[in-house]
Amino acid sequence: MKYWGEKLEEKIRMLPDSPGCYLMKDRAGEIIYVGKAVNLKNRVRSYFRDTAHTPKVEAMISHIDDFDILLCETNLEALILECNLIKLHRPYYNILLKDDKHYPYLKVNMRVPFPRLEICRKMEKDGARYFGPYIGASAVRQVMEAVRDVFPIRSCRQELPPKTPRRPCVNYDIGRCLAPCAGKCSEEDYRDMIGGVLNFLGGDYEQVLARLRKDMNEAASVMRYEKAARIRDKIRDVEGMMERQIAARTDRSEQDLIAVAQDGLDAMVEILYIRGGRMVGGDHFSLPGEGGEDAGEVLASFITQYYETAGLIPRNVLIQTLPEGSADQLETWLRQKKGSAVTVATPRRGEKHELVLLAEKNARDALEKRNARRTVREERTTGAAEKLGRILGMDHFPRRIEGYDISNTQGEQSVAAMVVFINGVPERKEYRHFRIKSVEGANDFASLYETLSRRYAHAAKEIREGAADAKFRDLPDLILIDGGPQQLRFARQAIADQGAEIPCMFGLAEKREEIWLPDAEEPILLDHRTPELQLVQRIRDEAHRFGIIHHRTLRGKASIHSRLEDIPGIGPERRKALLRTFGSLKAIRQASPEELRQVKGMNAPAVEAVIRWREAEQTGGKE
């Protein structure tokens, strides 16, 4: 049996028979895991025995250098404390729920005289009626639109009833509001209408469909076919909502169905929401590294984190599996959070068991799709980079790929762009621009030579000085030059003249997407459907895009500057001051004489000169 050192062995020997939490620490004193236990002695000692553990636990144990414990009176206290400690310390080896989405609800505040529909992200104990959650803003807006098409519920935020009646808005004229602000309806009549709204939001669609069908038939009977078609489309929208809300075949109480799928590496938890006996949606949460852990432990830890911040705790929570004895703890904790009765169950047969199996099926599907997306993403990034490296004859993986492109307009405002891909993914904070300084006219060869010379000169200086904020020290494994053999030759010569080791380089000739290697007699032609050529094209296109954007910016500034040069009496310093103050020609044209006088260096003659220049432009003078 491994000896853990005198200090740790003494702590292990002194562990108490008590509920509580334990905090595992590494050599740096960082908390790497927080757990709870009914009996701290038995639970914590189990980590330090020569018994089989899951790979994740083995990895965590290998980093343990110390631990602390916090005693609690009851198991429930330990559960609450564990939840708070995980939220506070975010330990590396705990299940960390990173998804902080709060789905929208529809709220009807029945405590005000004339309620309206409101969208909110959090349920509160304010006596209002809440409906949802709806999966996404588009879904909740669709529901609101369906309600307002049938029920003339007010949409304004005015406080009602008003002290004095107001003129009704256009919604009253088109039949979409009862205009309580203008005294056109009583509170009793409005409440009757709201009753229909609540029924609809609770799942009773037939009243709405009957009204819509009636309106559609009436429009068709008087040959208002466009209106009838719009109502028909609205009927399809409502029927689509009905189809998505699968009947749960149980009672009409609120239920959350929770299950997990695991693949040995990662886990995926699925939650299905049932409200009013209908399934109103679901969501899934990826838990990396939890694929080999006990499913019950994964779900128990997930549930405490999820409901700690959830807007709604339902009346019933049906769970695929839980550790023995933990259902009662979770139930008590959820009751305290909700402030009313909550039932936690792991059904083994019957309709509720079938519903949990449905959640498990959704979890498996989400995990398979996530893995498929990840596989595709890897094929397009690291996989493509690895294959490209092999094709180019590299003996190692090209972690950092740099792409270069030159942009100019007839040799003016020449700019070089450097883009960087790390592991096949754009790393935008590493992008750099170079203003070409030593080249006259449109000479891409000389511009590439200057760009690579400066890039490697900067790197050499940073390496030599050990710069803390280095921007060029990380050298590329692979360089892409937008061009053919000639451009490639100049780029290689620039690096050689800096005394640096020349990395693997290639040129991409745009006409046939030919890949040219140095001193090669024939280009390499890749299948256009392969991820490696698509990666090369992405790098080339990104370098071109990045260079063009900067070039246009410089060209625009130069254009503004040249127009201001046409103003007599406005020299370089005043031009700079005007641009610094107003930012654009348009703003300078629109500035008042008083605003122009406030600019540093602008006197009365200069202001007059700007005003005359503006007037000349307006009458067709030279810009």
Image (spheres, rainbow, N blue to C red):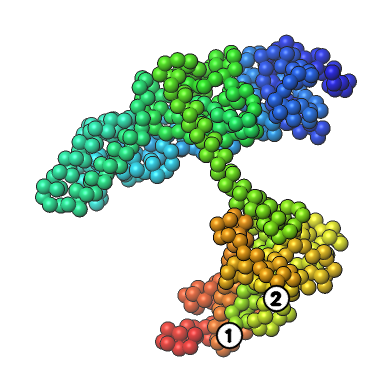
Q: Residue 353, which numbered label?
A: none
Residue at the (55%, 29%) spot, across then down: 261
Q: Residues within 10 Å of mark 2 (few under 14, many from 20)?
A: few
Is 142 situated above or below 530?
above
What residue is shown at x 56% (from left), y 60% (from top)? 528
Q: Is residue 585 above or below residue 62?
A: below
Give the side of residue 318 with respect to residue 416, left or right.
left
- Residue 534, quarter of the rendered image: bottom right
Residue 187 lies, in percent from the top left, at 24, 34
Q: Quadrant of residue 82?
A: top right
Q: Which residue is mark 2?
A: 486
Horizontal side of 174 relative to 449 (left or right) equals left
Taking 123 as reference, is 577 above or below it? below
Residue 377: x and y, percent?
59, 48
Vertical comparison of 64 with 559: above or below: above
| Sooner in the amino-acid sequence: mark 1 or mark 2 | 2
Closest to the observer, 277 or 23? 277
Residue 50's spot in the image, x, y percent?
Answer: 79, 19
Residue 196 in view of the camera: yes
Residue at coordinates 77% horizontally, 14% vertically from top-left? 15
- SS class, disc 1: loop
Q: Given the image, on which type of amino acid does mark 1 rest?
A: Glu
Residue in view at x 52 percent, y 26 percent = 259
**Residue 418 seen from this side:** no
Camera-near label (1 vs 2) is 2
Per the image, the residue denoted by label 1 is: 565
